[in-house]
């Protein structure tokens, strides 16, 4: 019997087999003076149906519907004896039908569930005594699937206002969220406050906030949660809920890290509202500088600031660059991971992860014009008239350009006086002497034409890996012309620079 039920469970699709998908829609018209009479729902897929239903008279002038791609849903609440009533399409979801299928089964079937919320005037409120007929008209993507209208209960809140500031950096956020999902978000940093951002919470986000508001029961919370006296300046939050339901309306404030016995009630609301703030108005992560001497520890690249304190470069592309400058000072900007407040020491080293945004030193140089001069056993390279040690994957290509000026890409390190000292060469500009084939692992990958500019990415004594447009492949070096412009008058004598083919580069 147990096996029979298990088999039946496998054949049931819909409940848990596929999650519902939210369908985006756009409000065309909404108000209190629609058609009088009985409640009605309309599914309109043509202009003729729109006019026959009378919905066209409710739409603003100039409203357009592309019937080949869109359709219209209209919800009429019917005649009401006073004001204070409203109706709203709160969400549209695409659901999979539950079906007992043969094996193998046909393609799954779907339907659209339109969630409609009816609201009435709160008890004791003042309303107009005129007849009203609330309505809501929306537009969404055209579908031939079945459409079901489902009445849902009103939201547990009419408005939620929440603000939070979290250390370090005092990155703040504030949101005012309505029951219809309309949200106004304001972000702030310690010395900046950004303009309000208008957004829309998703139906799933609104459902999460509603559950959290019901759990929080803000009306029964203290207006100010106690914070330990030794906390001088920590995180802070405030929450205010407006609701017609008893016990849900109220406000509270405190430190989100010290909710104590109230944490089970408040933590879900804080998490749900912070998530909406970050989605609607994300702020870039704060950046800081890190510097030190480049060291290698296993596969890690570190910047050793001082004994006992280092920064680990977590971005592979930046670590690959700094790996060439072991023993040299470097400086980067990026997001520095928070760490425990411990006193670093050689016996207890502190290693802090850095997600690098930019390498400040060495400096990135693109199309840097360098002079390549003949030298005993090779060539020497001058940057702005100063001799430098040139190295890197593309540096051997410079051996083919003595007495010329070459445009290259690289990373330039300067000395204490700010003068060029070392140059990592990772790209050399060249032109093709004659039409040639690009190859990779012996296979053809493209063709280059005579006179075409390419960038040498890696070179040895005989051939080079080049980038030509969107293609990368191998060419013989004698097919390339490097540095066609003659070098200017030689500059003062220099210490040896690049010599030989730089084995292993």
Image (cartoon, helix red, strand yellow):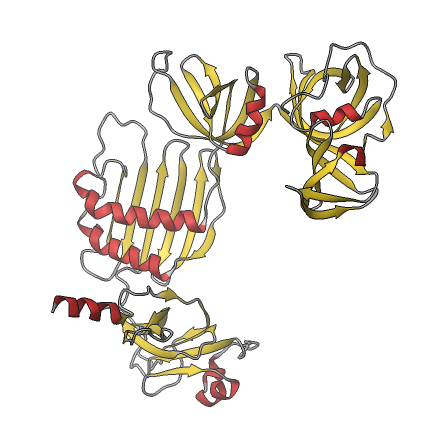
Asked whether residue 217 appears in the rendered view, the answer is: no
Write down the quadrant of residue 138 in the picture.
bottom left
In front: 139, or 61? 139
Image spot of residue 292 (x, y percent):
51, 18
**In this picture, residue 486 sits left or right of residue 179:** right
In front: 137, or 488? 488
Write down the quadrant of residue 206 in the picture.
bottom left
Image spot of residue 169 (x, y percent):
42, 32
Q: How many marks?
A: 0
At 72% across and 33% down in the image, what residue appears?
463
Q: Quadrant of the C terminus?
A: top right
- Considering every residue shown, the one lying at the far left of the view is 1
In front: 154, or 438? 438
Q: Quadrant of the N terminus?
A: bottom left
At 35% across and 80% down in the image, what residue appears?
132
**In this picture, residue 357 sits left or right of residue 88:** right
Task: Give the answer, above or below, for where 193 lies relative to 124.
Answer: above
At 16% across and 70% down in the image, what residue appears?
4
- Considering every residue shown, the one lying at the far front of the view is 442
Image spot of residue 265 (x, y percent):
20, 48
In front: 419, or 300? 300
**In this picture, residue 433 sits left or right of residue 178:** right
Image spot of residue 148 (x, y percent):
33, 78
Asked whether residue 492 appears in the rendered view, the answer is: yes
């Amino acid at each position: 019997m147990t096996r029979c039920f298990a088999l039946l469970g496998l054949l049931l699709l819909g409940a848990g087999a596929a999650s519902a998908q939210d369908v985006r829609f756009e409000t065309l018209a909404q108000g209190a003076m629609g058609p009088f009479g009985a409640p009605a729902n309309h599914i309109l897929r043509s202009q003729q149906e729109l006019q026959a239903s009378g919905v066209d008279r409710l739409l603003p002038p100039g409203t357009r519907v592309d019937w080949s791609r869109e359709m219209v849903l209209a919800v009429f609440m019917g005649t009401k004896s006073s004001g204070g009533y409203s109706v709203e399409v709160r969400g549209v979801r695409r659901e999979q039908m539950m079906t007992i299928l043969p094996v193998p089964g046909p393609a799954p079937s779907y339907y659209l569930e339109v969630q409609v919320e009816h609201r009435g005037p709160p008890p004791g409120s003042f309303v107009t005594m005129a007849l009203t007929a609330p309505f809501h008209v929306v537009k969404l993507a055209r579908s031939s699937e079945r459409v079901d209208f489902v009445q849902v209960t009103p939201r547990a809140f009419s408005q939620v206002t929440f603000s939070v500031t979290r250390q370090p950096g005092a990155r703040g956020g504030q949101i005012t969220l309505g029951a219809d999902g309309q949200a106004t978000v304001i972000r702030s940093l310690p010395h900046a406050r950004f303009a309000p951002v208008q957004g829309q919470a998703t139906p799933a986000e609104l459902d999460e906030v509603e559950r959290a508001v019901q759990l929080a029961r803000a009306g029964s919370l203290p207006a100010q949660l106690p914070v330990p006296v030794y906390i001088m300046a920590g995180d802070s939050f405030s929450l205010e809920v407006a609701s017609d339901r008893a016990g849900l309306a109220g406000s509270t404030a405190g430190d989100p890290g010290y909710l104590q016995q109230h944490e089970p009630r408040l933590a879900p609301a804080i998490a749900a509202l912070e998530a909406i703030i970050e989605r609607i108005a994300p702020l870039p992560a704060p950046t800081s500088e890190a510097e030190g001497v480049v060291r290698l520890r296993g596969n890690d690249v570190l910047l050793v600031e001082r004994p006992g304190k280092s920064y680990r470069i977590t971005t592979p592309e930046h670590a690959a660059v700094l790996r060439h400058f072991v023993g040299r000072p470097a400086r980067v900007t990026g997001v520095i991971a928070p760490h425990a407040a411990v006193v670093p020491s050689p016996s207890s080293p502190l290693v802090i992860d850095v997600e690098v945004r930019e390498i400040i030193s060495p400096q990135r140089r693109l199309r840097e014009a360098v002079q390549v001069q003949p030298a005993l056993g090779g060539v020497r390279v001058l940057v702005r008239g100063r001799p430098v040690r040139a190295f890197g994957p593309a540096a051997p290509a410079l051996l083919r350009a003595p007495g010329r000026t070459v445009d290259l890409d690289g990373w330039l390190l300067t000395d204490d006086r700010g003068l060029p000292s070392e140059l990592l060469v990772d790209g050399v500009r060249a032109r093709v002497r004659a039409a040639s084939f690009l190859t990779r692992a012996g296979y053809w990958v493209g063709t280059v034409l005579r006179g075409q500019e390419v960038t040498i990415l890696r070179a040895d004594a005989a051939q080079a890996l080049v980038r030509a447009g969107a293609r990368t492949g191998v060419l013989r070096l004698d097919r390339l012309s490097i540095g066609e412009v003659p070098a200017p008058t030689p500059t003062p004598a220099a210490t040896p620079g690049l010599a030989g083919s730089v084995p292993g580069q």
